[in-house]
């Protein structure tokens, strides 16, 4: 059996989005592999102690994004599209970058300056990893 | 073929100081409905009518296909009902109650009852009078759950419980729903519990139903918009917005029928949308009750 998902009450996002994100993370890190069967909606709802309708919505959205596939009567599985885990991590990176740019725009920081700071951030990470 | 576990249509009940006014709601089989309302809103009266314990003045109640109160004996075989005022025998043990219920209901699942004893941290040999409030509530629920009824009707099952006991109960209710032939109606004023495990939400206030619908759709319709307003501009309440509070150049608009276009509509009127926030069921509950009371009084 899979560990149930852990939802946060202080997270302001709706529960279905939290469920989607945690499933994506499981796939991104390779815990759930391409093509692998995943728990049924009712099973995951019972294990996580959330309503069926919330898990159903998360599964529908994940299906729309091509991350899982649900076949009537046969349950759901992770999509077999190659490189799905990597694609999800790329998406995550994309989102971080967009968030950073949004904050930068609010602060009035120009793209050139962002480039410089990004390089600096890269240097700091490299330094820390080499220790 | 009737796949509604509960169907109330136009239920009215008049008391001297309180009345239920045309209560209609539907609970499809396989779903959990959370009934939310302030104290005295009419939750318990509604539940007692659908259990056949009180007779309505007008309107129809069908539970598991049975008209109530006419067929209450047949219906109750498949209903598990628990409420605060249900009495257990103080001088008897929980185990005595378990064998008593088992002798009446053929569906009693004793191995499940033993599992529940463990999960709830209860002991069969303990007398009811020595139980704490939380243990009593859990004992009552155990006696109802182990019968595996098709419909559970629970009046305030988590009220007065500590957080651990509350979670034990919510987890157990979520487990019941693994079987899509079973259904649950529970009332609560703890909106967090309702938000977590309900498929459907029904709001009741002052004897009237304010809203009754799919939880995901419902939460999706409510948003709070934080707006920056140019000096001198007074923001109107646009369609779908129930409340606008403006102080100086900042305003907060509460929408109960949010669509993305609403943000654009405010922008074309000169406001800048700072952010659009989701609302918790608790925030919605308060906003909704205030709004509906204003409407009634207007």
Image (spheres, rainbow, N blue to C red):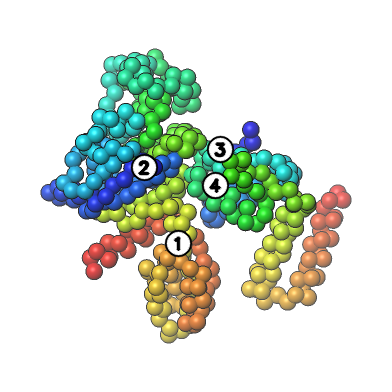
The residue identified by callout 3 is A43
**SS category of the residue bearing label 4:** helix
Q: Horizontal and vertical percent for residue B216?
A: 47, 54
* Residue A26 pos. (x, y %): 69, 45
Mark 3 or 4, nearer chain start: 3
Q: In the rendered structure, are the residues bearing label 1 and label 3 in contact, judged by CB atoms less than 8 Å apart?
A: no
Q: Which one is closest to the eye, mark 3 or mark 2? A: 2
Closest to the camera, between mark 1 and mark 3, is 3
Picture coordinates of residue B236, whole percent (x, y): 39, 78
Q: Name the N-terminal-most of marks 1 and 2.
A: 2
Q: Residue furthest bottom?
A: B232
Residue at position x 37%, y 68% in the image = B242
Residues packed near mark 3 inside 10 Å, few (<14), some (14 to 19) or many (20 plus)? some
Quarter that holds the N terminus of chain A: top right
In the rendered structure, are the residues bearing label 4 and label 1 in contact, judged by CB atoms less than 8 Å apart? no
Task: Work out whether residue A111 or residue B257 is closer to the camera in this orientation and state it.
Answer: B257
Q: Which residue shows up at 59% across the image and 49% down it?
A: A59
Kindly identify the residue that appears in the image at 40 percent across and 45 percent down: B28
Label placed on residue B90: none
Q: Residues within 10 Å of mark 2 (few under 14, many from 20)?
A: few
Counting every numbered tag in the picture gives 4
In the image, farthest residue toward the left: B16
Looking at the picture, tell me which residue is in the foreground, A38 or B138. A38
Residue picked out by circle 4: A55
| Mark 4 to mark 2 CA distance (whole Å) | 25 Å
């Amino acid at each position: 059996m899979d560990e149930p998902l852990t939802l946060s009450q202080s997270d302001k996002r709706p529960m279905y989005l939290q469920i989607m994100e945690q499933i994506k993370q499981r796939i991104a890190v390779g815990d759930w592999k391409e093509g692998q069967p995943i728990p049924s909606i009712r099973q995951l709802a019972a294990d996580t102690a959330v309503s069926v309708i919330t898990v159903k919505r998360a599964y529908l959205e994940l299906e729309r994004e091509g991350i899982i596939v649900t076949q009537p009567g046969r349950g759901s599985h992770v999509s077999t599209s190659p490189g799905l885990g990597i694609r999800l991590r790329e998406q995550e990176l994309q989102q971080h970058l967009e968030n950073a740019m949004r904050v930068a725009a609010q602060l009035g920081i120009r793209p050139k300056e962002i480039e410089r700071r990004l390089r600096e951030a890269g240097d700091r990470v490299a330094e820390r990893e080499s220790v | 073929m009737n796949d509604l576990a509960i169907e109330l249509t136009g239920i009215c009940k008049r008391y001297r100081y309180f009345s239920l006014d045309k209560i209609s709601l539907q609970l499809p089989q396989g779903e959990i409905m959370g009934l939310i309302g302030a104290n005295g809103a009419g939750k318990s009266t509604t539940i007692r009518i659908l259990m056949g314990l009180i007779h309505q003045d007008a309107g129809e109640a069908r539970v598991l296909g049975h008209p109530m109160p006419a067929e209450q004996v047949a219906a109750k075989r498949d209903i598990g009902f628990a409420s605060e005022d249900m009495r257990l025998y103080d001088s008897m043990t929980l185990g005595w109650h378990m064998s008593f219920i088992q002798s009446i209901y053929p569906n009693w699942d004793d191995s499940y009852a033993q599992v529940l004893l463990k999960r709830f941290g209860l002991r069969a040999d303990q007398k009811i009078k020595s139980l704490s409030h939380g243990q009593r509530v859990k004992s009552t629920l155990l006696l109802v759950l182990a019968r595996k009824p098709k419909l559970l009707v629970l009046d305030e099952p988590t009220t007065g419980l500590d957080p651990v006991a509350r979670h034990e109960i919510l987890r157990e209710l979520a487990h019941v729903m693994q079987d899509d032939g079973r259904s649950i109606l529970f009332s609560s004023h703890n909106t967090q519990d309702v938000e977590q495990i309900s498929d459907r939400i029904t709001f009741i206030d002052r004897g009237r139903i304010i809203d009754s619908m799919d939880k995901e759709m419902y939460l999706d319709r409510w948003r709070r918009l934080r707006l920056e307003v140019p000096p001198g501009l007074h923001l109107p309440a646009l369609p779908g917005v129930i409340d606008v509070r403006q102080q100086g150049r900042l305003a907060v608009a509460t929408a109960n029928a949010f669509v993305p276009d609403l943000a654009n509509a405010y922008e074309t009127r000169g406001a800048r949308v700072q952010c659009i926030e989701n609302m918790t069921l608790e925030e919605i509950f308060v906003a909704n009750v205030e709004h509906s009371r204003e409407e009634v009084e207007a």
